[in-house]
Amino acid sequence: MTTSIAVVGVSGFSGIELVRLAAQRADLAVVSVLSDRWKDAGLGRWIPGLPAALASLVVRPQADALAAARDADVVVLATPAEASADLAPKILGLGRRVLDLSGAFRLTSPDVFREYYRFEHPEPALLAEAHYGLPQLPAAAGDAPRLRDARLVANPGCYATAAILPLAPLVAEGLAEPDALFVDGKSGVTGAGRKVAENLLFTEVSENLSPYRVANHQHTPEIELALSRVAQTDVSVTFAPHLAPLRRGLIATTFGRLTERGRSADLDGALRRAYAQASSPFPDPVVEVVAPEEVTVKDVWGRPTARVGARGDTRRGSFVAIGSLDNLLKGAASQAMENLLGMVER
Amino acid sequence: MTTSIAVVGVSGFSGIELVRLAAQRADLAVVSVLSDRWKDAGLGRWIPGLPAALASLVVRPQADALAAARDADVVVLATPAEASADLAPKILGLGRRVLDLSGAFRLTSPDVFREYYRFEHPEPALLAEAHYGLPQLPAAAGDAPRLRDARLVANPGCYATAAILPLAPLVAEGLAEPDALFVDGKSGVTGAGRKVAENLLFTEVSENLSPYRVANHQHTPEIELALSRVAQTDVSVTFAPHLAPLRRGLIATTFGRLTERGRSADLDGALRRAYAQASSPFPDPVVEVVAPEEVTVKDVWGRPTARVGARGDTRRGSFVAIGSLDNLLKGAASQAMENLLGMVER
Amino acid sequence: MTTSIAVVGVSGFSGIELVRLAAQRADLAVVSVLSDRWKDAGLGRWIPGLPAALASLVVRPQADALAAARDADVVVLATPAEASADLAPKILGLGRRVLDLSGAFRLTSPDVFREYYRFEHPEPALLAEAHYGLPQLPAAAGDAPRLRDARLVANPGCYATAAILPLAPLVAEGLAEPDALFVDGKSGVTGAGRKVAENLLFTEVSENLSPYRVANHQHTPEIELALSRVAQTDVSVTFAPHLAPLRRGLIATTFGRLTERGRSADLDGALRRAYAQASSPFPDPVVEVVAPEEVTVKDVWGRPTARVGARGDTRRGSFVAIGSLDNLLKGAASQAMENLLGMVER
Amino acid sequence: MTTSIAVVGVSGFSGIELVRLAAQRADLAVVSVLSDRWKDAGLGRWIPGLPAALASLVVRPQADALAAARDADVVVLATPAEASADLAPKILGLGRRVLDLSGAFRLTSPDVFREYYRFEHPEPALLAEAHYGLPQLPAAAGDAPRLRDARLVANPGCYATAAILPLAPLVAEGLAEPDALFVDGKSGVTGAGRKVAENLLFTEVSENLSPYRVANHQHTPEIELALSRVAQTDVSVTFAPHLAPLRRGLIATTFGRLTERGRSADLDGALRRAYAQASSPFPDPVVEVVAPEEVTVKDVWGRPTARVGARGDTRRGSFVAIGSLDNLLKGAASQAMENLLGMVER
């Protein structure tokens, strides 16, 4: 049985990677691709290396999204949050399922949403319904069983995935104090999407490192929400992201205080237990647990894999836990592929 | 009155920058330069743009260090820690003063030194005597008055300077909880010195970010010691450094919990008060207090200036404080110049 | 029918890419992989993303090359020229076929070989026998029919491929004066292989461009030989390669004088005619003819495709013809795959 | 005696470097700086490291150019060609001298100007009058004596300077065939000025090399004109520039056929003779003659120096001659400084 998908916003970095991944699977058929940037030419003009059928698929304008949705089992939205928030309810209204790569459905509170995304959510009821699709979250999250049945799946953010994966096992096992966790993010420029903006010029990015949205980035409440579910208690996260001079790849370095129990625990063991059973639809694993010094960008670049590692400092009662991933793959398209396959699993 | 200086280890990145800075001052005369890498040629062969007198100064082998010391008022050691630990006592024994750019004299405890530097300090008594030369440390540190009289000055580490400058005012004013501070460091490759090592190849560094010495880097106790003096209480720091794909420049992003008093305080104001009076021997200031998003590498690259910025999150009771600098200037050579001028001030 | 191959020198950049390409084909079975750098661990430890069978294939020491050859239909040598020159005759002696990625068998004259490779060829008779495997060379080269029958195939150099492809149609049709062609090469650092050398450090390569082996690079006679066969007259080439600050990718910009006939000819048309029929074993074409300004690295990065483009300046009687490719793919591994498939075609 | 200068277009990369250089000289006073990008703030807000007087100089809108000209001895135009072509005649009309960094006055023929600059020159008479300010051009150019008296000086282009310097001695001595010279240029992105354009984004430039304006770049006739004057015969040049992933720095690699006399000549000696007497107003020389492999960007980065080197291939009757420079210094601002000092020399 083949699942047919439509991809809205195919010309973005994540949309392109998603099409590349889908092209490798016989059980998925990309039947429509939409973009206002590329419209009216075959996909092969823009994305090299595709099989002939996909290469000749003509890109449609985004205004065709609802028409395209009718012919698809699942619609993948690789659009900005505001566009996704507008489109998703309409597509659900047609009886189609939605996998959204933006942040439009990752939070549950309309108030928090407004504060961080800076617009009013048009369909707050869907915030409660949407499934947060990070398949490796410990069972305590209670979400995994619902993926198969979800109408609307929110694909996690790139920073959020890289921060949640190393931290979740520590808070789940009560090893890290939940009241004050800290996340330092460093991302390559494709994390910002394909924009022509002065701060993304080569002369601005190369030989530079720059913090942005310090202590007010929109992935902050997303990390808190996911970790609070896992910990079954409120978790507080302070987050500072930085732009680094590379194309793709991201590291989230997290810090916190160990609980009494955490001081005598084996943090590496906790991570290994958490991800030992994680299944992968790719030749590569979806999570690799390694020493913190091996949680590099180089080792996950171009791969659907997150690396995680942790080290406790028992004298100081603290820990460092690190996650790295390719922001376009495990931080976007390959995680979307995990979710897509989970949605249609039989 | 001219002060004569000898520079041992002139071929390192810091040594080169120091000579460049000294060349611009009429009150300093570089009388000897030593290096085993460059010996027996005029300095101009290796460092372009020098005035004729310096360009023709012949580089001597490092074995001549004691002979060279005899002709100098101050000997600057731009050598690895083990070499500095060996040379400094001998030079002091000749009645000459020493400014050391390595970590050999930045700590006070021989035990902590051994743990982090991985060799036995040959002259532990000097650890207590050495002046830690970060001239902008708040007066509470009690060190500033001693610079003029110090026989032996330890120039701070690059990460340490970038972390101490934004944190010192916060702990000095009792705004940050001292029991658990966290530092995330990101540095360009010149921070590792001029080594031919696989991990410094272009193919390893470009498109990569990689953590190293996580929670056990030797600048950790250096930061703790400086902040503890300022706070007049024990300060605990957990530090994770990362190598980033740029030549020079460094950011230290620090995190912690606010004290009760800190929650209602103006963190930016605290930084501004701390550095308002900092004097600079350069056209540029030595510290600039800006918004956290402006604490970039680009804005300090090639300058003798550290930038610092802080933001509190009162709801979460936490803060982020960031420092950036050029690792070869405020993280090494220009700070050495500040110290050198302070040592010989009349 | 499956062809079994052994790869000697699998840990080099080209060896890795070759294994990745072979993993995607059902008609090829990699049965042995050899490397002194990686020996005694499964290939999956070093190359992520491989199917299970390949990932578990244990890397053998290079000393096992002859034993491994006995079990393979074709032995791929991804070794330095001196090692290839030594191994190839021995493998042929066992009745096995060889595809060599080094320069050991790309020239025909032992004298020219000695001058450019700086060692004495141990088996000069094989220089005459080896098939130069650039499958898109115009039929005039007379080589294409022999690939299927060749015992020994020399895979072309990366610069040579990028220079020959845009120039061959021009000299074949008598549009370019053959007495003085000029090639300017610019390559990313992986072109130099995986060496720990000072000139390949990040601090040396970034923010730098540097010429090397100016007018005496070993690909010079290789280009001349291939073009002379195509032109059926002696062709003279002057070549200057440069190292550029990128990981992979290469551009050869070629210049020359137009013949009388060339001044009224359509150079773009000549290129299109030459490559219109080129067949490709990949989803992507092996050659794309585009405007000169579109012969970029970006458009061939990660692809098995060379781009070529040409423009004449009739007033000046001159032309510029440019070729770009990914030095690890069309400049090495994907071209090797083309040759491998051509060798075993039935 | 102090010369007062006004700088129009100070916010461009070249304008900034020019102010930095002027700040170091006691005989030059920058009295006005103009820019529509920066207007109404002190220069120190944008350019760090300036002495107090310059840092506090308020940037004026470009509409004030004529008023500012009245107070200056020389007006430096760091404006686009179209703006320079408009402003220069008006400033000359006020009796002030002009040093123009654009291409507006580098050619002599209005027809060639229109073809390459794509607009009609508003003041063609000035094309004949303008002095082409490349001070190291061999005396045969007949221009050097006029610099002191010139009302209008055209500062050469960056590619043009890098190509002319290695070629001029070869054509002046009759060593290179003038009918067909070839120039391959490779430049960092600051060569394109400070524009927000898609092709200058980090994601487009890094890991890329791309040719542009192949065989029709506007520096082509500029190189031909300068070399024709030197050779005292028509020189034909074919030029292909490329964008490379670095911030600053440029290499021009030139190729051609040797004349009969050139085949037995010492090309390196010809370059050395040509530049042995070149005087420099900087601690560094303005030209360094080295082996071709040492004509790198690294060795001229941040310096007012061009490097040149040449090698003949007598067997092939050809040569390669290479020039490298920092496009913002010897390719723009430091050469402007040479010209400025020459204009006011007494």
Image: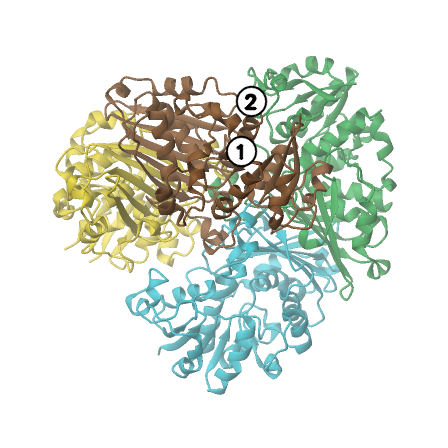
Chain colours: A yellow, B brown, C cyan, D green
Secondary structure beneath disc 1? helix
Secondary structure beneath disc 2? loop
State the residue in front, D274 or B335.
B335
**Callout 2, which amino acid?**
Arg
In terms of image quadrants, where is residue B140?
Answer: top left
Q: Which residue is mark 1?
A: B336
Q: Quadrant of the C terminus of chain A?
A: bottom left
State the residue in front, A181 or C265.
A181
At 43% from the left and 68% from the top, the residue drawn is C10
- The residue marked by circle 1 belongs to what chain? B
Few, some or many C-alpha atoms within 10 Å of disc 1 (few <14, some 14-19, many ≥20)?
many
Q: Is residue A115 above or below residue A170?
A: above
In the rendered structure, the answer to whether residue A17 lies left or right of residue D261 reads left
Q: Is residue D22 visible?
A: yes
Q: Which residue is mark 2?
A: D37
**Callout 1, which amino acid?**
Ala
At 76% from the left and 25% from the top, the residue drawn is D123
